[in-house]
Image (tube, rainbow, N blue to C red):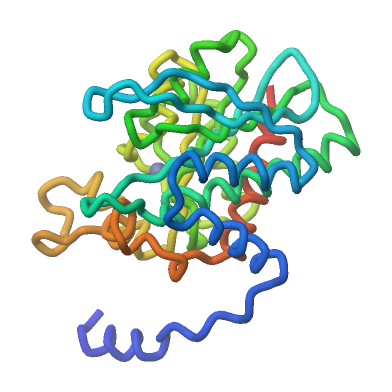
């Protein structure tokens, strides 16, 4: 295609103003706003309070964490369970944020209050489903602490678990906007059936899903390192998702401009991780997808 016609096309498809948010999407954005620029202890308290508001009985799982840089630092994951059974579907999202260079806290809304809100939404959807039709699986929602210090909260949580109970794990990191789902295929052989379920559901729902041979690490690595079935899901706009694919998988000839950094990586861990990027309706859409993926994993053997 000629550059000329590309330009014409881009004028024709200039972004239009988003429709007004749905009430549900607005509620999600309000919930996420609560986390902006709080300390990680405050963020944990907000997770607990929001879960209680939704009728859950969250448990704190405390641990001694920290790393070489921070020294010993206590932390606590927040856990809720739904349903009963011998096997678990585990869903994770970290609630902690990073301090910025000037010492203030990142607002941590794209990374990762958006995923926390999505996971809470998914928990509500799964609870409603399980109450209607109890299955044979338990769903364990783990809001992890100290992911940003080196996946510490997830590791400490897993150390305390009977791993033979874990059927599959869905991790959510960076889910604040966009309708394109991204997931990594570098999650170990045991995860093949989880990736298959993902592909099937993307096709059935006509979701734009991008599989990454290499996907950046998150809490999923704690599970894949032990050979447990896991998938890590993120979301963003289609252009950003494909730029990120190229950055991580395109090698030397990825076609991206010299020094190009995918926009999402300019936002997270910076002062630009702001509410402006957060879209409650996109989060609701992702949350519904993830809830259905968890229910699917409990159905498919
Ligand atoms: Zn993150």
201 is higher (above) or lower (below) than 154: below
Q: Residue furthest right?
A: 132
**How many dots with numbers?**
0
Q: Residue at x 65, y 68 (%)?
A: 26
Residue 64 lies left or right of residue 72; in this view the side is right
- In the image, 136 versus 26, the foreground residue is 26
Q: Position of residue 91 (x, y in %)?
A: 59, 33
| Residue 188 in view, yes or no | no
The residue depicted at 58 percent of the width and 22 percent of the height is 61
Q: Is residue 214 visible?
A: yes
Asked which quadrant contains residue 4, the reply is bottom left
Looking at the picture, tell me which residue is in the foreground, 251 or 150: 150
Residue appearing at x 51%, y 45% in the figure = 43
Tell me: residue 260, above or below residue 127: below
Looking at the rendered image, the quarter that the N terminus falls into is bottom left
The location of residue 229, given as percent across then percent down, is 51, 22
Residue at 61%, 65% in the rendered image? 281
Image quadrant assignment for residue 148: top left
């Amino acid at each position: 295609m000629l550059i000329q016609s590309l330009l014409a096309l881009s004028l024709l498809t200039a972004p239009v103003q988003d429709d007004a948010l749905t009430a549900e999407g607005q509620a999600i954005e309000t919930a996420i706003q609560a986390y902006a620029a709080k300390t990680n202890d405050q963020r944990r308290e907000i997770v607990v309070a929001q879960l209680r508001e939704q009728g859950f009985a969250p448990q704190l799982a405390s641990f001694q964490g920290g790393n070489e840089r921070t020294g010993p630092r206590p932390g606590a994951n927040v856990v809720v369970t739904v349903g009963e059974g011998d096997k678990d579907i585990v869903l994770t999202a970290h609630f902690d944020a990073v301090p910025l260079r000037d010492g203030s806290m990142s607002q941590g809304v794209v990374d990762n209050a958006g995923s926390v809100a999505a996971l809470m939404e998914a928990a509500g959807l799964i609870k409603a489903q399980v109450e209607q039709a109890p299955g044979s699986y338990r769903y364990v929602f783990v809001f992890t602490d100290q992911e940003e210090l080196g996946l510490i909260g997830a590791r400490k949580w897993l150390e305390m678990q009977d791993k033979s109970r874990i059927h599959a794990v869905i991790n959510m990191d960076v889910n604040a906007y966009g309708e394109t789902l991204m997931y990594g295929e570098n999650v170990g052989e045991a995860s093949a059936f989880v990736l298959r379920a993902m592909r099937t559901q993307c096709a059935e729902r006509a979701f734009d899903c991008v599989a990454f041979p290499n996907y950046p690490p998150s809490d999923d690595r704690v599970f894949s390192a032990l050979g447990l079935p896991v998938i890590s899901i993120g979301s963003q706009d289609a252009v950003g998702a494909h730029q990120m694919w190229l950055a991580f998988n395109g090698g030397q000839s990825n076609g991206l401009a010299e020094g190009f950094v995918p926009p999402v990586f300019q936002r997270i861990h910076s002062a630009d991780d702001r509410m402006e990027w957060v879209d409650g309706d996109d989060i609701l859409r992702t949350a519904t997808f993830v809830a259905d993926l968890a229910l699917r994993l409990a159905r498919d053997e």
